[in-house]
Image: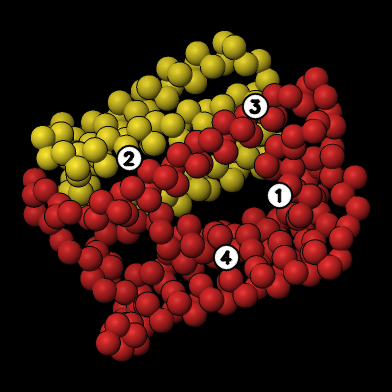
Chain colours: A yellow, B red
Amino acid sequence: MLTFVRRSRSVRVLGASLLLLVLLSALARLAIQDWFIWFWAVTAIASAELLFIAGWDLAAQLDRRLPPLVTDQNEGWSPWAHAVLVPFFLGAGVLVDHFLVH
Amino acid sequence: MYWRNVARRPGALVAIVAGLGGAAVTLGVVIYMLLHKRDISSCAAGYAMGPPLDAVFVVACLAAFAAGGLLSGAPGLTRPAPGYAAGERRPDAGTVVQALLVAVLLILTLLLAYETWSVSMLDDNPSPRFWPITYFVRCASRLETFATLPVATAICAFFGKWLWYRPGGAEA
């Protein structure tokens, strides 16, 4: 699994994106005092990151010299890890939004 | 020829029927709300509906998400996705689909930026001219609760189908 994490470009891009999101969110927190507004700012930053990745991959499809950032490789961890990922973040998002943000 | 191929694929038929049904329900809701205009002055404060109906929405959306995800992998409803060996580059997924993804993410980013800006304006003016998008959603859920519920449920079902990636099942 660790080999896959080191070898997979998608996982490296995911790690770099999360690191960038943490850094930009911390910077945004310095400027935005209200937690509610900061929450929405973080969602906009995350969406902008996804837009950049999707835009890069579109450019990679048009120009084969560019490497795609998202590579579709089914490998590394169990199917259970894949299957619980989205429900976990969905549940966490619902709980945070319902009990903390509101 | 095309429609004959579609008729042989249960998943495509389900998607078409569900899409047409959803469009009909949405159109009906829009016409109903246009014919029965409501006083929205109470929505300016942005209050969401309270308990216990908010719990009904959460439970219905989670159930719809699970149903949408599980049905997408049900035998006979979808075709198996192609498998790729380790390190193999995927074949062209379609530049048009990728361009659509970029367009959707661009719209989403702009909407989230607007939401952030409009929410930040509330401190200076509690009854702003430009409402946050969430205010419209909250307003609809308060004024037309039982019309909003099927729309929210359908959106959650689509999210479950599109976003819940589960390799190793019938789909993968």
Q: Residue at x 8, y 49 (%)?
A: B88
| Residue A22 in sight here | yes
Q: Position of residue B75 (x, y in %)?
A: 31, 78
Mark 1 crowdedness (10 Å alpha carbons): few <14, some 14-19, many ≥20:
some
Foreground pick, B69 / B103? B103
Dot 4: chain letter: B
Q: Which residue is mark 4?
A: B154
Q: Position of residue A25 (x, y in %)?
A: 49, 20
Mark 4 crowdedness (10 Å alpha carbons): few <14, some 14-19, many ≥20:
some
Mark 1 to mark 3 CA distance (whole Å): 17 Å
Which amino acid type corresponds to the residue marked 1 in the rendered image?
Val
On residue B137, the disc is 1
Q: Nearer the viewer, mark 4 or mark 2?
A: 2
In this rendering, position of residue A81 left or right of residue B41:
left
Q: Position of residue B4 (x, y in %)?
A: 31, 89
Mark 3 to mark 4 CA distance (whole Å): 28 Å
